Amino acid sequence: MTYRTPKASSQPALRQPLWLRLLGLAALALLGVGVTLALFVSPADVNQGNLIRIMYAHVSVAWISFLAVFLTAVFGCLFLWQGRRVHDVWAVANAELALVFAALTLVGGMTYSRPTLNTWWTWDAKLTLTALMFALLVGYFIVRGLIDDPERRGRVSAVVSIIVLASLPFNYLAAEWFRTLHPAKSLALDGSGVTMDSSMVQVLLVNVAAAALLYLYFMLERVRLGRLEANLDEAQDTRSAGAPQEVIHV
Amino acid sequence: MSKAGVGDVAAVVEVARKDLLLELRSKEVVVATLFFSGMVLVILAFALGPDETALRNAAAGTLWTALAFAGVTSASQSYQSELDEGALEQLLLYPLPRATLFLGKLVANWLFMLVLSALLLPLSAAVFGASIAQHLPWLLLTVALGTFGFSLIATFYAALTANLRARESLLPVLIFPIIVPVILASVRASSEVMLLGNPAESRGWVQLLAGFDLVYLVVCTTIFPFVVEE
């Protein structure tokens, strides 16, 4: 705990710093490379033909959404442990990105299954898991929206994020056993398993890297905004209280 | 957190006894929930049509739907009574680990759900023409594990949402995505027993239930103090 000092050395810059802007441009450039590779360089699949090109966007986005949920819970734990508001800011940034990437995964999965399996929705374990995760994240934000006190809001949403993370393996198992006929198997890339041509793996990895870089950029930008928001909140609180108060140092 | 001692166990029992005694004297929740879940069974029977095989196949699913809806209502009620006279603050003032409060409420909610399912099982067997007599112990084990997992999540989230606006409508939204594995495993395990009379087939589901119960018992008990901290 420190008293707020007039110098604003720990304040995040009001304008986006140059390195962050460069990171955003790099993410955009890598995304361009990934899309080009996926659309023009990657060979068409033996079974699915050109439809395989959806997979590059779908799989990379899905991986990032799970990473983001995991990091939300990690920052939630840190908040519970140390009570520093900045950890809540990091947790929210990750939760918002998890929600966006989960939504993209669902949209991608539906676009993918429409032409390949001739249905908009399949009870595939991974897709079902993503849908449940999406519902859980919506719950996370509903709870957040109902609590005004930032300390309590951070605490309760950290608790929710831990419960959400713990539910994922069970949801996955249940969803997998729910369908004994795995649509994923009919999707196997060469008809026998998840063996993939090495040129395809390379394209996939470039796309995963692009999605990860994009995620990193949005996360850092959201954290920067979140810290500005938190500082504004505290400044307003101190002003309304009319006296110097103890503030949690962000 | 202090080491669990005899005093903590006594506190858990005392909290559970208090909740159950309150319920036994007022009978508010029991009557409402029992009729509510009975209505759910009847409505589902109407919705699924007069075809007897269809009804029998749906028996386990409807039973757990009714139990899940009733469980949400009773869990949110169990904190409602604490909010009225500032009773929760009083409870929290006792020099005991906060987890005892959670475990006590959990035991009370679980016993409540067990009673409810004991009443609903024969009712659903009658309405849906399913058999519950064969392999009864195995069915009871499934019901015990399933309702325990459900009560865990419901009790935890009821505490979490206790002083939030719109908690009545909020609670199912938060609870249901998490208990999907519990509902699914319970329905599958009990329908194996009720329809096919084959407990061996359902062993995997029962193991999933036991694993869920164990993991969430540890997780919820550990982080519950953060939920009620003021």
Image (cartoon, rainbow, N blue to C red):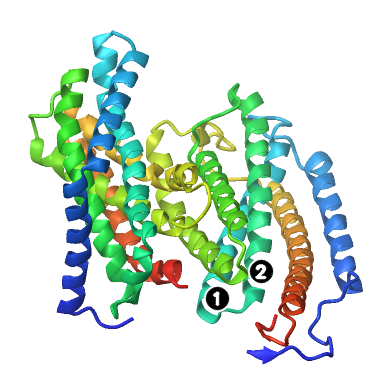
The total number of labels drawn is 2
For residue A90, the mark is: 2
The one nearer the camera, A56 or A103, is A103
Give amino acid for label 2: Trp
Task: Give above or below for B5 relative to B228.
Answer: below
| Helix, strand or loop under label 2 | helix
Residue A81, image x, y percentages: 51, 79
For residue A78, the mark is: 1
When asked about the image quadrant of residue B204, the answer is top left
Is residue B120 among the parts visible in the rendering?
Answer: yes
Q: Earlier in the sequence, mark 1 or mark 2?
A: 1
Residue A216, image x, y percentages: 74, 64
For residue B32, the mark is: none
For this view, does B208 lie left or right of residue B144?
Answer: right
| Helix, strand or loop under label 1 | helix
Q: Mark 1 lies on which chain?
A: A
Q: Residue at x 43, y 43 (%)?
A: B176
Task: Give above or below for B18 relative to B53.
Answer: below
